[in-house]
Amino acid sequence: MNTLISGKSVHFDDRYLHVELEDGRIISTPMNWYKTLQNSSLLQLKNYRFICKGTGIEWTDLDYHLSIESMLLAQMQKMAA
């Protein structure tokens, strides 16, 4: 992807990880794609920070990193299948 996709906020519900982007879009992907996150407490999930100029998310307590671009690519691949 050519443009810088940066996150603004992260939210969770019982099924999805939602990332609001700086441009107003919201990416939602199933929590079961991320076993580490799915098996974590709400307190651990809320303890995140954006890294790499907002293009990634880090949960330091879990030693877990997620690329926002990878969320978009996975979402597009699932829709194409």
Image (spheres, rainbow, N blue to C red):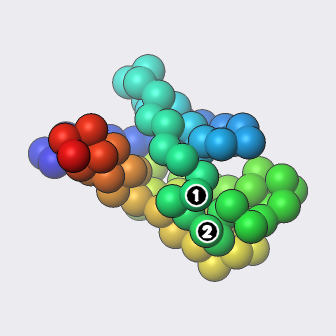
Circle 1 sits in a helix, a strand or a loop, which is it? Answer: helix
Crowding near the residue tagged with mark 2, few <14, some 14–19, many ≥20 C-alpha atoms within 10 Å: few
Contact? badges 1 and 2 (CB < 8 Å): yes
Q: Amino acid at mark 1?
A: Asn
Crowding near the residue tagged with mark 1, few <14, some 14–19, many ≥20 C-alpha atoms within 10 Å: few
For the question of whether residue 18 can be seen, the reply is yes
Please tell me in which quadrant of the rendered image residue 32 appears: bottom right
Please tell me in which quadrant of the rendered image residue 39 appears: bottom right
Whole-percent x and y of residue 18? 57, 38
42 with respect to 54 (left or right): right
41 with respect to 48 (left or right): right
Whether 38 is drawn above or below 18: the answer is: below
Camera-side residue of 14 and 4: 14
36 with respect to 51 (left or right): right
Circle 2 sits in a helix, a strand or a loop, which is it? Answer: helix
Whether 16 is drawn above or below 50: the answer is: above
Q: Amino acid at mark 2?
A: Lys
Whole-percent x and y of residue 58? 58, 64
Residue placed under numbered mark 1 in the picture: 32
Whole-percent x and y of residue 50? 54, 54
The single residue placed furthest to the left in the displayed view is 2
The disc label shown at residue 35, or none = 2
